[in-house]
Image (tube, grey):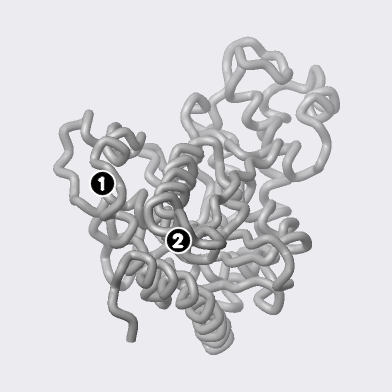
Amino acid sequence: MASQPILFSGVQPTGGGIMLGNYMGAIRNWVKLQDSYNCLFCVVDLHAVTVRQEPARLRELSYRNAASYIACGIDPERSLVFMQSHVPAHAELAWLLTCNTWMGELSRMTQFKDKSAKGENIGTGLFTYPSLMAADILLYQTKIVPVGQDQKQHLELARDLAIRMNNTYAAKAKEPLLTVPDVYIPPVGARIMSLSDPLKKMSKSDDDPAGTVFLMDTDAEIEKKFKRAVTDSMNRIAVSDEQPGVKNLLTIQSVITGESPEACAAALEGQGYAKLKGRTAELVIETLRPIREKVHQLMDDKTYLDGVLKRSAEAASARAEKTISRVKEAMGFVTR
């Protein structure tokens, strides 16, 4: 395990919890990647508070995220599963990186630009959180980061900061301070779209709750959301950019079945959109039901979860301390 390349990723404990888009675009792939990488999977609770959270809800969702990772197939005996806030070095390295990040870089980040354009009152945490995201990755000398296409911009900043820190503080050293990470974007299922607006990515913060399916939704809720899924008036089941709603449903089927979207379309040829929606709902329900049941089981007795989180945080902290000590020494801090 120690000789394998290091992989890091995480999901925020916000909204309605982990959604279908997180599962299909990220967590399903994490499970497979455990075989090839030394994996750290974090509940990124520090990122969650860039906007104000209700404390009890944040605590509940943080536990639920960790339980969901395990229920989806992350093995705590092979991978680390921990809370970001349980490893203080995340915040410490984030500050050191923030001091080496330019205002222009942060102001170009899509999430900040979008919120700024709406005239919203934006906290400094939302502005600087890409530096924290970079710290999450660089803290563990991460080589691979599985992300969706919309997060690629943040990975580019992490790469730029790693190179900048290496050139500024370790130019004459035998080895770089920080590993320059590579992005991993899975070929299928990396971008699951909203059921109510298939031109937008499925989101925990969707204004229309019918657009997002959550892992903890009941079978009836899932069925209802897919019945209301937006398609079009073409009445043709095909993989086409002209039919984003139909294409999205076929993509979801493809990720679950392992068949190509075209094969999924061919199996439903001439059967109409009701059948397409019903088949997609059926597959999603069958996939999520055992996960939901396992999450409930883990949440009913948090003793096991607390043990996993504690062991993983201790192991992650030991790794993180090596990086933070080297970075601080290179920057000129007095060692203790």
Q: Residues within 10 Å of mark 2 (few under 14, many from 20)?
A: many
Q: What secondary structure is found at the residue carrying circle 1?
A: helix
Residue occupied by mark 1: 127
Residue depicted at x 66% and y 57% = 30
Residue lying at 73% horizontally and 18% vertically, measured from the top left: 238
Image coordinates for residue 304, horizontal then vertical, percent: 58, 86
Q: Which comes sooner in the sequence, label 1 or label 2?
A: 1
Q: Residue 202: x, y in percent? A: 50, 39
The image quarter containing residue 257 is top right
Left or right, residue 191 beside residue 163: right
The 10 Å Cα crowd at callout 1, few under 14, some 14 to 19, many 20 or more, is some
Please state, as top left, top right, bottom left or bottom right, where the C terminus lies in the image.
Answer: bottom left
Q: Viewer-proximal residue, 327 or 197?
A: 327
Q: Residue at x 57, y 16 (%)?
A: 232
> In front here: 178 or 10?
178
Q: Is residue 13 left or right of residue 67?
A: left
Left or right: where 141 falls relative to 100:
right
Q: Amino acid at mark 2?
A: Asp
Q: How many marks?
A: 2
Q: Which residue is mark 2?
A: 136
